[in-house]
Image: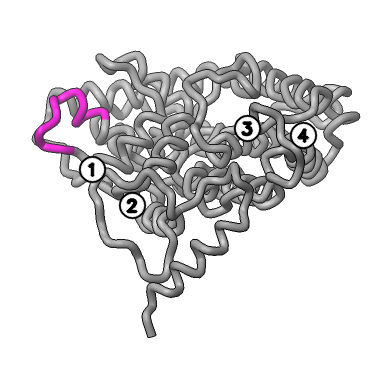
Amino acid sequence: MDLSDVRKRLEERELSLSPHAAKSAQSRGREVPEASSPVRTEFQRDRDRIIHCKAFRRLKHKTQVFIAPIGDHFVTRLTHTLEVAQIARTIARGLNLNEDLAEAIALAHDIGHPPFGHTGEQALAELLPEGFRHAEQSLRVVEKLERLNLTWEVRDGIVNSSKVREDIFAEGYGVPSTLEGQIVKLSDAIAYINHDIGDALRAGIISEDELPREVLETLGSRHSGRINTLVCDVIEASYAASGLLDAPDQIRIQMSPPVSAAANVLREFMFQRVYLWEGRREEAEQAKHVVSELYRYYLAHQDEIQSDFVLPSDPAWRRAADYVSGMTDGFALEAAARLAPSSVRWVRELRVS
């Protein structure tokens, strides 16, 4: 038996997808050419490489929103990533697009996130000569640090996955070239604005009766209902992408105006009441202080960077940044406790309260 017949059969199945879908056999390829897998398409191979890499494993100990939570049910960067992948696959399947590509991009879109979520990202952005953005670091992780040699389509989706605050559909830091990448960018927002509600309720920051009426009336009052409304609306509003209808000149992933407006209202509510809540300001500043202290320390003590997650040929600032950004929350706190004990006192107080 020729095992390569398995891959060929999988690639033939992709021919039944929408003409607007990315096809693995038509990929723009990898930076370093290599022989194909006999039993997996190129996008399936990318997905598997991401799942097995060290940076993906560390996501289970990285913060999503709340720093050092003690409850079992708070969202981590890993559980967020899995929710994004599930939502993206559902939308891609509904639109007759490539599920494997959407899943691969989703699984890697946050793989370069530093400890303490966007607070840690902001700290490094203020310190590094070239700034810091987690999507760019995620691309750096898969290209340079883990050397996964992924396809162009997956790398494009990763680096263009970030959003800005203004609008859920704002182009922000770039638009993915594939519809599957655009699905992941939107699925990221669908996931976090909903699961972060649960964490905020669990932490006592908001109550259910404070959610905007427009959100409850349009999207629903329950977590599962809101996600179902958003996912179904994206599929319906974007159905031209399926190739099963007469398509307009420009195909894009979108929502209907009422649902998009409600999603933006919910997103802004979460920014005001949760992400930028004044009660979390001290906690966020302390977390930034931990990241800043670690970066400065390892910048000055390069010999103490014991990791294969840095490149010896890089300048000192890049090596320090790669090392610190790769840390889990717990590892960062333990390192800071040794190097600057006063900087982590707030965590002990948080866990006691």
Label 4 vs 3, first from the N-terminus: 3
Q: Are marks 4 and 2 in contact (CB under 8 Å)?
A: no
Amino acid type for the residue under numbered disc 1: Phe
Label 2 vs 3, first from the N-terminus: 2
**Mark 1, secondary structure of its residue:** loop
Q: Position of residue 120 (x, y in %)?
A: 41, 26
Q: Which residue is mark 4?
A: 237
Q: Which residues are magenta?
A: 311-321
* Cα–Cα gap, marks 2 and 3: 25 Å
Q: Which mark is residue 54?
A: 2
Amino acid type for the residue under numbered disc 4: Ala
Residue closer to the observer: 55 or 90: 90
Q: Are marks 2 and 3 in contact (CB under 8 Å)?
A: no
Amino acid type for the residue under numbered disc 3: Ala
The correct choice, above or below, for 13 with respect to 116 in the image is below
**Mark 3, secondary structure of its residue:** helix
- Quarter of the view holding residue 301: top left
Q: Residue at x 16, y 38 (%)?
A: 311
Colouring of the image: one colour
Q: Which mark is residue 309?
A: 1
The correct choice, above or below, for 17 with respect to 279 in the image is below
Amino acid type for the residue under numbered disc 2: Lys
* Cα–Cα gap, marks 4 and 1: 42 Å
